[in-house]
Image (cartoon, grey):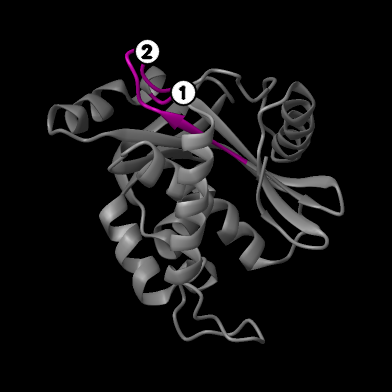
Amino acid sequence: MFIVNDDSYGIRLTDTSDGRNSASMLINRMYAWRGYSGDHQPSNDPNRITLTATDKGDVVGTLSIGIDSEVGLMADEVFGAELDAHRANGARLCEFTKFAFDPSVRSKTALANVFHLAVIYARDMHGCTDIIIEVNPRHRRFYERMLGFRKEGELKINTRVDAPAYLLRVNLNYVTEQISIFGGTFAADGETEERSFYPYFFSPREERGIINRLLRMDESHPA
């Protein structure tokens, strides 16, 4: 099901085995390139949603969204105590995992669009309040500087990829505020005074249109 689509580029909800296999191939290729171990197949768990970006039919990017449930999140394996502290304070958590983009894709807008759609799914379709991610130390500054994430706890070993990881968190109220201020404000030449990723997100008007379309799709396909 395509959510964003133009003549060559599209972002879709990956809900078929073929789509998950294409996403898995990209994830494994990019993770191996970074030196991570393991086999990283997107799940068909109903609490996990996978988005894929395609360019002329080829999968060039993917991101999975895990919605907190009674079985917990993947990050609980390493950061369970930190997550439980937020749950105890009433947070409705989600995690973004398996974020991979082909290095040939240089478009900041393509990256931002996938992340923005994941935000919409988490916030508007599932009522989440906070996003958490596990990141390698060398990627930590990107998420902090470009998206406003903050470190939670200390550096640990993520056994799924056999690599060190920080737990980062961002509140969705903050994300919503940044989108309302900066979304869609990047210049035609790609330059912007704001140094975060938020100018490359959809504009607030475009965001409302996507949310309404997703809500209509959800109503027409009840569980």
- The local secondary structure at tag 2 comes to loop
Q: Is residue 59 above or below residue 190?
A: above
Q: Nearer the viewer, residue 195 or 199?
A: 199
Specify start and end residues of the magenta stretch as a single range. Answer: 63-75
Report the Cα–Cα distance between label 1 and label 2: 10 Å
The residue located at (59%, 52%) in the rendering is 114
Q: Nearer the viewer, residue 32 or 111?
A: 111
Three-letter residue code for mark 1: Asn
Which image quadrant is residue 85 in?
top left
Three-letter residue code for mark 2: Val
- The local secondary structure at tag 1 comes to loop
Q: Which mark is residue 71?
A: 2
Which image quadrant is residue 45 in?
top right
Relative placement, left or right, of 69 versus 197 is left
Most common secondary structure along the magenta stretch: loop
Relative placement, left or right, of 167 versus 28 is left
Which image quadrant is residue 163 in?
top right
Q: Residues within 10 Å of mark 2 (few under 14, many from 20)?
A: few
Are the two marked residues, 1 and 2, in contact with CB atoms closer than 8 angstroms?
yes
The residue located at (49%, 74%) in the rendering is 199
The residue most toward the top is: 71
Residue 88 image position (x, y, % from top left): 14, 27
* Residue labelled with disc 1: 47
Residue 63 image position (x, y, % from top left): 59, 41
Q: Is residue 111 magenta?
A: no
Q: Which mark is residue 178?
A: none
The residue located at (30%, 21%) in the rendering is 80
